[in-house]
Image (cartoon, rainbow, N blue to C red):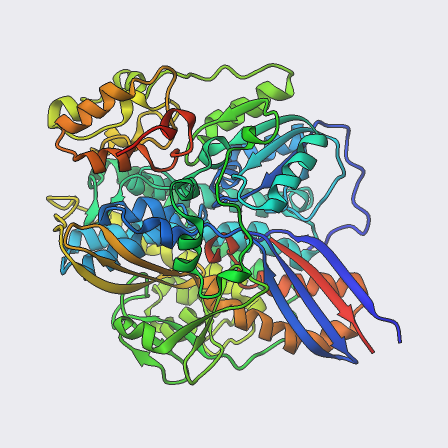
Amino acid sequence: MKRAPVRPPRPRKLPKIAVWKFTSCDGCQMSLLDCEDELLALAGQVQLAYFPEATSTEVRGPYDLSLVEGSITTPHEVERIHEVRRVSKQVLALGACATAGGIQALRNFMRQDDLTKMVYASPEYIETLATSTAIADHVQVDYELRGCPVNKKQLLIAIQTMLSGRKPTLPTFSVCLECKRRGNVCVTVARGQACLGPITQAGCGALCPNWSRGCYGCFGPSESANLDQMRATLRRCGLTDDEVVRELRRFNAGAKEFQGVRP
Amino acid sequence: MTARTIHVDYLARVEGEGALTVVFQGDQAKEVRLDIFEPPRFIEGLLRGRDRLEAPDVTARICGICPFSHQLASSLAIEQALGVETTPGIRALRRLVAAGSWIESHVLHAFLLHAPDFLGYPGALEMSADHPELVKAALKVKKIGNALCAAVGGREIHPVNLRVGGFWRAPRRDELVPLLPDLAWARDAVAGLLPTLAKLPFPSFDRDYELVALSHPDEYPFFEGRLTSNKGLDIDVADYDQHVVEEHVQRSNALHSKLKGRGVFHVGPLARFNLSYEKLAPAAQAAARTVKLEPGVMNPFKTLLVRAVEVIHCLDEAVRTIEGYQPPPSGFVEIPKQAGSAGWAVEAPRGVLYHAYATGPDGLITRAKVVAPTSHNMEVMEADLFHLAPKLARLEHGAATRLAEQAVRNYDPCISCSTHFLTLKVERGP
C-alpha cells in the first residue's frame, strides 16, 4: 500500500479549527467524527489544525474557531481554558459539560472529600476542584451548543455560520414545539408519563417521546422555562418531591435555571 | 552519558488524556509508565442516592465512544441484583445493539485512527488524499454501524431507548428492515478490504499473554458468559471481586487491575478472537482464513485485523437477526423497587467491562463500581512497552516515539472510560 509522502504538502490557507477537550466523555467531539458524509467535505473547507482525537497533525494557532468540549474541574483546566481563549478568534462551547458543567456538576451539590473517598482508595493523589463549571464561567464564549451530546446537524450549522462571521440562531424554544411538529402524541397528556419537554431546549428533534419515553432534559433549560409549572406537572405524574429534584438535577444540574432547585 | 528524551505533548488518536514515559538503560527499559491525567469525574460516587433506573443514562456519560456497553452493563447488573429476567426478544435486540456499537467503534479505531500509524500518516483525513477509497469505505461502514445503533437505541451517542429491563420501545420491523441492504454490503466490503489491511507492515512482536474474555457456550460473547482465559481462568462473573483487584497508583487517575495470584492480563478483541474463534460467524472465519489470521495470534499490532474480523461477524449477525426479527410483545420487563446487589460483565469493543451495584429497599443506589476495559489493560500496555524496548532502542528518536504510541494504540485505549490523552516521554539513559 502507498505510504505517506515524506514531506506533507503545504496546507492551503483555510480557516483553522481546533478541538479542545476538558472534563468530558468525548461524546461531543465524537459527534463531529460521526458526520461521516460531511466530514471529508468539511475537511476540504477548513483546516483541522488541532484535533488530537482524530489526527496527530498539530498546526500552531491562532485559530479561527475553537470547539471546546467538557467542563472545568481542575486547577490546571482553569489555566488551560484561558490559554485556549487567547489563541482563538471565536469559541464554540459544545454540549452539556461545556455549557452547564455536565453530569459531573452533581458534585457541586455534594461534599468533595466524601465523593473522592467513595471512588478512590488513595484520595491524596487526586487533584480536583470542588465544582464542575461551564466554560462561560471562566472565559468569554461566542456561542453555546446544548445537548448531551450535541446534535450533529446543529454542530455543522454552528461551525459553518461562525466561520462565515455570523452568529448562529438556533432555536431556544422548548422540545414541546418540536414534538408537536413531529406529530407525536403527548406522552404526559396521553399516558401520564413524566416529561421535561416543556422546559427543555429544542434541538434533538423530540427524540425521546418518539421512543415512548418522556424527555429527560439533556439539552438543558429552554428560554423562559416555567419551573414551578413543571414541578407541579411532574408531581401530578406521580413523582415524589425527591424524584422531581432528581429529574431537574441531572446532565444540566449546573445550569443557572436549575441551581436553585431544592428538595 | 547523554540522556535522550522524547516528548510528545498529547498522544493523538486515543480517547482521553495521558502520558507515556520509557526510561532506557542501554537497550532495555528501566522504567515504563503510562500516566493518566484525565480529570476524575466520580461517576460511581454521583450514582449514590440516584434511582436504580437512572444508572444506564448516567453511566452512558462515562464514555461517548462506548455508551451502549455501559448501558448494557449497568442494566444487566441491576437486573441481576433485583432478580429480574428479561425475554429472548429483548436479548436479541440487545445483541443487535451491541453489534452496532462494535461496528461503529471498531471501524473508527481500526481504519481511521490505527491504520494511519501503519502507513505513516498523521490521521485518516491526511490518509484520504492517497487512499480515498479506503477512507470512504470506512466512513460508510461506520455510518451503517451508527444507523443500526440509532435504529435500535434512538441515538448513536448516549442512546435514549435502552433502559433497565430492556428498551422503552422495541423497534418496529419497518424501522430495521431497510438497513438490510447496507449491512450486507458492509459485511462484504469489509471482507473485501481485509486482504489490503493484512498487507500493512505489522511489526513482529509476539507476546505470551493471559488473555481474558467472556466465553459463552454457543455464541461469540457480547454480554453473557463465564470469565475465562487461555491459561485456565474460568470463573462466574459473580466472583469477579475475588479474582480481580484494583490498585490506585499516584501517577494515574485511573485504577489499575490485576488478577489475584496471576498478575497482568489482556482483554479485548485479541482475547475474544483466541478464546471464541469457533463461535465467529462462518463469514468472519472465512475472511480471517483468507489472511491467515488464526487462533494463537499473539501480536497486539494485529488487533487491527481482529477488529475487522469482528466487524464482519457483527454485520453478519445483524443481518441474520433483522431478517428473522419480530418485535417482542413488550420492549421491557418491569423492575421492582427493592434491595439487592450484584455485578455483571459485558464485552465492550475494547474488552471486559464490569459494573456492580447495590440498591436499598427504596430502589436507590447505595454502591456502584465500574471497571472499564482500559483499566484492565493498563498494566499490559506498560508490559508491552517493556518488551518493545529493545526494538525502540534501535530506532531513531522519531520512529521510536511513533512505534511506542502505536503500541499503546493497539489497545484503542479509552481513557475517558478509565477515568482521557497521552503524552509520550521517552527518557534514554546510559
Q: Say if residue A133 shows up in the picture.
A: yes
B94 versus B303 height, above or below: above
Task: Point out residue B351 in the picture as x, y percentages from the top left corner.
Answer: 42, 64
Residue A50 falls in which quadrant of the image? top right
Q: Residue drawn at (46%, 54%), measured in percent from left and top? A: B417
Q: In this view, does B347 lie to the left or right of A236?
A: right
Exactly how many numbered labels are in the figure? 0
Q: Residue drawn at (50%, 79%), measured in percent from left and top? A: B209
Query: Which of A43/B58 is in front?
Result: B58
Q: Residue drawn at (59%, 33%), measured in percent from left and top? A: A67
Task: Point out residue A7 in the picture as x, y percentages from the top left corner.
Answer: 82, 48
Q: Say if residue B187 shows up in the picture.
A: no
Query: Which of B300/A103 is in front?
Result: A103
Q: Residue drawn at (13%, 50%), measured in percent from left and top? A: B337
Query: Which of A172/B329 is in front?
Result: A172
A131 versus A144 height, above or below: below
B191 versus B329 height, above or below: below
Task: Point out residue B146 in the picture as x, y percentages from the top left corner.
Answer: 41, 42
Task: Point out residue B360 in the picture as x, y percentages from the top left corner.
Answer: 18, 55
Quarter of the image with the C terminus of chain B is: bottom right
Q: In this view, does B42 lie to the left or right of B325?
A: right
Q: Is residue A18 left or right of residue B186?
A: right
Residue A199 falls in which quadrant of the image? top left
B393 versus B304 height, above or below: below
Q: In this view, does B33 lie to the left or right of B192?
A: right
Quarter of the image with the N terminus of chain B is: bottom right
Query: Which of B371/A154 is in front?
Result: B371
